[in-house]
């Protein structure tokens, strides 16, 4: 039985990867941060099948311990301060986790088990101010946020350890991938959550920043398969994982509302742009400049040709299916929340009477 260590196991990708590796018969170990209230996040449903090890990417000793305890054949480094917006507020923490943290983990592997195969979660944010369209493995990097800069360090140190110590170390340059398990601060989940609330009449409108930025959005479940494939090859290498399609945030908004039969009519421009529910005339989308970023990545579109030909990777979930799944999931969650609120209200009324 193969053993795998996943850092960031409680996050979106960590949870899908853990499911995939369990299905394949791996013994799965997950690095988890100690919290005052224990919270398994996205792996709550499989917590009995995973071996958790407490640790932190900024603590080399804990990573040495994690590699020792897990005796991992494969190490997937998914842990990160992954929200681009926060990287301007916490630039030092971001580089300590997303940059130096990668060196810590590579050192732990080099010291404890150099035969372990290593996956680094690199990102399309490294392309930032894009130098080529579409972006591929050979496109020059130009990160536009402290997150992108920190991840670029993680990317190069992975390459450097591969070349210096002959470690089997790969970087997956993954473009945006979303899911029902995405954090609500990311634009896709923020939109699908708001769509469900507006549809149910418990939220009036959605506030966004730059709706013109373009992203190449796929589903996390498809992307974790690529991570595993990268560690099953004869030679370690780096790969772009993307859909080769790009859409604006505005198009994501329109598609999400369309799944609950709301047609959005746009009026105005710049910070005065609003989205109106065509059927009711109500404003359902507004711009709030607080969501603009100090520097923006205007367009991302990746070319996954190398991954498709060398790894045999292909995505199964289309853009429309991705949005549909996220909206359907948030509709269910909001309905559940509303039912609980109703029960609580009834119990309060009974107590008062
Ligand atoms: P996510 O949901 O934000 O998960 C990040 C995980 O990292 C969480 O489990 C978090 O733990 C953990 N973590 C944060 N700081 C840590 C630390 N100091 N020590 C140990 N663990 C720590 O992110 P995701 O979307 O699954 O992304 C997975 C990885 O892929 C990240 O490295 C991200 O930067 C990268 N990536 C993501 C995308 C995307 O579109 N999703 C694209 C390219 C690359 P807590 O639960 O304790 O916070
Ligand atoms: O923003 C714009 C925002 O925060 C997407 C991470 O997984 O993918 C992700 O980073 C776009 C940006 O993701 C709002 O300005 C408009 O242009 O969903 P996001 P991201 O920054 O692309 C990469 C590949 C990663 O590696 C990261 O870890 O949407 N946008 N209005 C907004 N974004 C947010 N969050 N909130 C808004 O209100």
Image (cartoon, grey):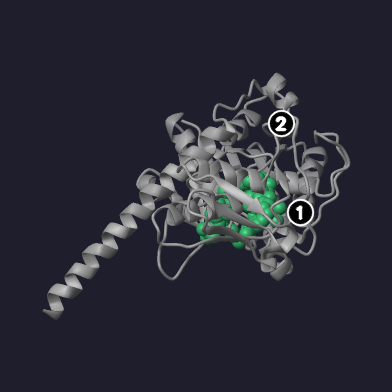
As displayed, is residue 285 above or below residue 47? Answer: below
1 or 2: mark nearer the eye: 2
Crowd band around label 1 with a 10 angstrom C-alpha radius: few (<14), some (14–19), many (20+) = many
Instruction: Kindly tell me whether residue 197 is visible in this rendering.
Output: yes
- Position of the C terminus by quadrant: bottom left
The Cα–Cα distance between marks 1 and 2, rounded to whole angstroms, is 20 Å
Expressed as whole percent of the image width and height from the top left, the position of residue 211 reads 69, 53
As displayed, is residue 336 above or below residue 14? Answer: below
Please name the residue that numbered disc 2 is placed on.
244
Q: Nearer the viewer, residue 317 or 353?
A: 353
N-terminal-most mark, 1 or 2: 1
Q: Nearer the viewer, residue 302 or 207?
A: 207
Residue 158 placement: quadrant: top right
Q: Residue at x 61, y 61 (%)?
A: 286
Instruction: Kindly tell me whether residue 292 is visible in this rendering.
Output: no
Crowd band around label 2 with a 10 angstrom C-alpha radius: few (<14), some (14–19), many (20+) = some
Give the SS element for disc 2.
Answer: loop
Give the SS element for disc 1.
Answer: helix
Expressed as whole percent of the image width and height from the top left, the position of residue 105 reads 66, 51
Q: Nearer the viewer, residue 192 or 19?
A: 192
Please name the residue that numbered disc 1 is placed on.
148
């Amino acid at each position: 039985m193969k053993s795998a260590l996943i850092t960031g196991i409680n996050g979106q990708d960590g949870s899908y990867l853990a499911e995939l590796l369990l299905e394949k018969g791996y013994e799965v170990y997950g690095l988890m941060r100690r919290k005052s209230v224990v919270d398994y996040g996205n792996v709550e449903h499989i917590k009995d099948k995973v071996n958790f090890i407490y640790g932190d990417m900024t603590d080399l000793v804990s990573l040495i311990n994690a590699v020792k305890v897990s005796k991992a054949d494969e190490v997937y480094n998914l842990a990160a301060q992954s929200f681009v917006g926060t990287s301007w507020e916490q630039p030092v923490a971001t580089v300590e986790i997303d940059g130096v943290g990668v060196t810590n983990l590579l050192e732990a592997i080099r010291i404890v088990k150099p035969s372990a195969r290593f996956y680094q979660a690199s990102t399309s944010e490294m392309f930032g101010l894009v130098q080529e369209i579409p972006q591929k493995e050979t496109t020059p990097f130009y990160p536009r946020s402290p997150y992108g800069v920190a991840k670029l360090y993680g990317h190069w140190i992975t390459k450097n350890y591969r070349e210096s110590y002959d470690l089997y170390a790969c970087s997956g340059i993954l473009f945006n991938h979303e899911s029902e398990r995405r954090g609500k601060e990311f634009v896709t989940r923020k939109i699908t959550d708001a769509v469900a609330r507006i549809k149910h009449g418990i939220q009036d409108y959605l506030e966004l920043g730059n709706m013109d930025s373009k992203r190449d959005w796929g589903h996390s479940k498809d992307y974790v398969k690529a991570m595993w494939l990268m560690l099953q090859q004869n030679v370690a290498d780096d790969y772009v994982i993307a859909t080769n399609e790009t859409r604006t945030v505005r198009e994501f908004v329109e598609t999400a509302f369309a799944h609950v039969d709301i047609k959005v009519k746009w009026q105005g421009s710049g910070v005065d742009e609003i989205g109106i529910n065509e059927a009711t005339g109500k404003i359902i989308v507004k711009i709030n400049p607080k969501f603009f970023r100090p520097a923006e990545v205007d367009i991302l579109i990746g070319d996954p040709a190398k991954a498709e030909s060398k790894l045999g990777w292909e995505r199964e979930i289309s853009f429309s299916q991705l949005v549909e799944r996220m909206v359907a999931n948030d509709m269910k969650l909001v309905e559940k929340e509303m039912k609980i609120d109703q029960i609580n209200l009834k119990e309060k009324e009974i107590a008062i009477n």
